[in-house]
Amino acid sequence: MKAYFAAALAAAAAILMASSATAGTLDEVKKRGKLICGVAPNIPGFAYADDKGVARGFDVDFCRGLAAAILGDAEKMQLTRLGPRDAFAQLQTGAVDVLTHRFTWTYNRDNGGGITFAMTYFYDGQGFMVKKSANVDSVNKLNGASVCIAQGTTTELNIADYFRAHNLTYKIVSFADLDEARRAYEAGRCDAWSNDRSSLAARGLGLQKRDDHVILPETISKEPIGPVVRKDDGQWMDVVRWTVYALIAAEELGVTQANVDEMKKSSQSPEVKRLLGVGDNLGQKNGLSAEWAYNAIKAVGNYGEIFERNLGPKTRLALSRGPNRLWKDGGLLYAPPFR
Amino acid sequence: MNAPSALAPAPDSAPPPRPGAVRRFAASCISTPANIALTAAIALLLALTLPDLVEWTLVKARFSGAGPEACRDPDGACWVFVSARIGQLLYGDYPPPERWRVDLVLAITAACAIGLMLRPVRRHAPLALALLWLGPALSWVLALGGVFGLPPVATTRWGGLALTAIVAATTLAGAIPLGLALALARRSQLPLLRWLAVATIELGRGVPLVAVLFVAMAVLPLLLPPGVELSPLLRAALAFVVFNAAGMAEVFRGGLQAVPAIQTEGARALGFTRLQILGLIELPQALVIAMPGLVNTAIAVIKETTVVLIIGLLDFLAQIQAGLADPQWIVGDQVRDAAYFFAGLVFWIVCFGLSRLSAGLERRTAPGR
Amino acid sequence: MAFAALFTARYWTWRRLGALSIQALIAAAVLAVVWAAAENALANLARLKIKTGFEFLERPAGFAIAQRLIPYSESSSYFAAFLTALLNTLVLAAVAILIATPLGFAIGVARRAPNQLLAGVATAYVETLRNVPLLLQLFFWYFAVLQTLPAPRASHSLLGVIFLNNRGLILPAPADAGSAAIALGAILAVGALAAWGARILRRRLEAGGATGGGALLAPALAFGAPLLALLAAAATLHWERPVLSGFNFAGGIVVIPEFVAMALALSLYSAAYIAEIVRAGIASVAPGQVEAARALGLPPAIVSLRIVIPQALRAIVPPLANEHLRLLRNTTLAAAIAYPDLMLVFAGTVLNQTVQAFEVMAITVATYLAISLVVSAAMNLYNRRVLQAGG
């Protein structure tokens, strides 16, 4: 009976389904003269608009960097704000070129949707916030608690897995958006609020008395977040991931937005010279100009600068680099060599 | 409460001489014990809610100040957010030197809406239809530019209240005539036409807008020949037209079937053709009867256009949510609540205006005269 | 007479010819559009590189759902998650329709009430609620509901068995699901029998010209018998009392605040629309008819019941069906305030986890369409009866 039902639906869906021409996203972007990025709607620090209407955020800056690398101009990009429901389908059908979104890289996503993750540019993890008055110092003491969450990409599953693994019960209250989850938690609907740590930090600013709340020490999940592209376009995937790697490498090599011109002119380091397209042309192999990495760094700065500008201690989010430090500083960021 | 007389249609054809306001109030509100109890309950409800509302929106609210720092008091609304972002709320990402065009669009849309409510206009269907289409057509030309020396502005930069107005006006301009056509097709003697109409109506009424927009965004492009590309805004508008026409069709159907059968029978006996009966007898009466329903549906359409935010179009409500995600404005619910209150107020003013206009009209064209 | 018949026959032949050719044209046009769309879809399909299929429905879902009317746990399948969410949607829509319709009728009538204050409040109600987007109203009601309720430790309690706090309304639950199901079945059976009996009784009584107390017998039977059955079931079943343990109450049935807020907001919002439809329907009845009926000496109650309402219903029922369907579609806003409906759970979490957007959305669209077709068919049936009754 169920199989019959499924077969009928499969037939119906087969008619509804297809992916558009995907050979040569790079050529398409160049022809269009504009890069279209799918970004998450309204995530503080990652994708939002300032008072003047200018798009800002970590994800947005990577879109700018990509536009600069490909088209030589960081403003030749267009943002499409997409919820998770529409984002994948929009990428599959070719309405957006890349998702610089908040999606976690998972097995199911990489194998089945016709999409793939280019690399990881932000390491997050799911945390819990509780009221100090509840006297809870560990997730393991939340047995029987109600937990408010914003329906994320992996949030529900993480909680289910963690609580079952630790033999704890819980009651889930799952919202479509972060700010409502925060508010319901604040109003007492839940004993804890759980989402990515970066989201807890950002939306936590909206708590009336932030000091009455505390984030528990445990991080219950791995959330490798990175740009998503269509699966059948290897060249495009290389363009996207190597551009991000170039920004990570730039931090490692000490190349910044401010000194990139200076470095390009006078740096003696062979690695820096290769990266910036001096005496070598790495970009050519990917259909880009010799100055692709230079353009990206010039436009948005290196990885560290992007982080500090949008999420770092000087911003209201005040996130520490944590795992998003360079490998040599004890973090997880590791760009393959440019040679 | 005196239910039966409340149910009877108001005999407003011959209003009695109007007594003084106090006498009228006394006669209607404190005439019987039940009425007195009702009046007292209503007064109590108002007394309990109104003062708090006034305190929050006005007394303790912040109207001016330097950005988010002015909004630290959680007990009063923060209107500073609205004034700091009013440009985006109204125009979205539309280039500032060109924003006069958006002002003009809003003015034209309002003028056409008012024009449509005027009696001489509504008496002449072609004129009404022309107005219904003129507004959106002018809006698109003005907002898009590229002609008459206006610099072109891509639809991706449209946003805010202007986008809401354009989407709503376009939807209504398409959905009302299409809805009438569907309602007539549903009564057609041609079975094929009837079935098609029923299928379209049921499809349109049955699928939630969220799913409709998914279809418009992800599935529609696959059904079009390669090379044909519609902007997301156009696709959303197209989906809105088809799906709201279904609702409109049912309103028209209600109006058509409320016309007493005896009138059409009489007309047929007098030798009127079916087209004449439809045009001269059924439609004029059906339109009057359907008017409140049409306005009802139109108001629903205007508010439902806010769904476009899920496909990345930054309409009025989406602009507010985008603003609330700016870290500097995340200082407490006073910002959020004030912003949503403002959104509600704007929608209320637009929709209430529309419903008042139509109510005035209803009084002037009440049936039975 | 013969001439007339000839004229009619020729007339109909021409008409039929015309009708046939028009229909042929329409059929050709529709076929052409469908053909072109299918052709394009197939062309796009040729480049398809997505793994498709509905096998995922059998895989374990792995996540929890806040409101379950059927047994569901993290190890249940995605299909079970779909069914659970579907039931949540149906219950919400049904409850909201059952509240909104009578409320809307009452407000629609109140707008014409002789008490000016009442009429004014009814008007203010309609003009406030129908002119503000539902999403904003949802937020308002949800956070208003949450803020007025106490924490679990400070619960309002009724006799120590029913509790109300910001986690919901907690009721005692039957300890044994099996006997509870039997009891529910028995209550439903008694209800159906009573309704049938009441119908027969009413016909008998009406035929006999019963008035006053006699007329109350039928409704007394229709409502009294199921109520007695309910009480009998409540007394015989073994009940499990909710107990506060740790953060929350354990045991019992929980009506979550999200459901209350959704039902409240949806029904209040739709009632405003229904009130407007009812008012317009009443206004569409020609005043001359009422005056004529009164002149005949009919009492006001009969004028309302036999003259105004049947005719008003003709103008009310089609847009009312519209409103009910709109309400059904509006349940999809539930995601905003965490009510686990089909859109939040299936077209949300399941879609997110599986990335099978097209399959999930195809099922979602088909499901909503199926529900609305059932509602629509029922309302069309009722509309036909109304048209017949109204003459």
Image (tube, rainbow, N blue to C red):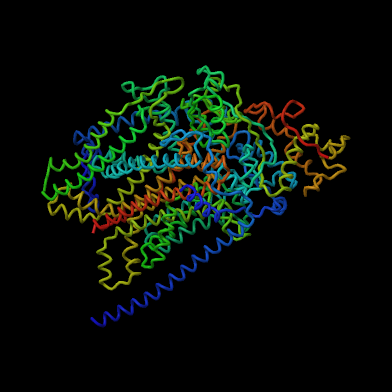
Rendered-image quadrant of the C terminus of chain C: bottom left
**Residue at the extreme bottom:** C3
Point 24% across, 64% down: residue: B262
- Quarter the N terminus of chain C occupies: bottom left
Residue A69 seen from this side: yes
Q: Is residue B234 visible?
A: no
Q: Taking C32 as reference, is A320 above or below it?
A: above
| Residue situated in front as seen by the camera: C86 or B144 | C86
Q: Is residue B369 above or below residue A320?
A: below
The image shows residue B269 at horizontal and vertical percentages of 25, 71
Residue at 53% x, 44% y is B309
Q: Residue at x 55, y 28 (%)?
A: A194
Q: Is residue C161 above or below residue C331?
A: above
The image shows residue A255 at horizontal and vertical percentages of 80, 34
Which residue is painted at 75% across and 38% down in the image? A245
Left or right position of A321 against A12 = right
Q: Nearer the viewer, residue C361 or C97?
A: C361
> Is A301 left or right of A53, judged from the image as shown?
right
* Residue A135 percent location from the top left of the image: 52, 16
Q: Is residue C227 left or right of residue A336?
A: left
Percent x, y of residue A144? 48, 24
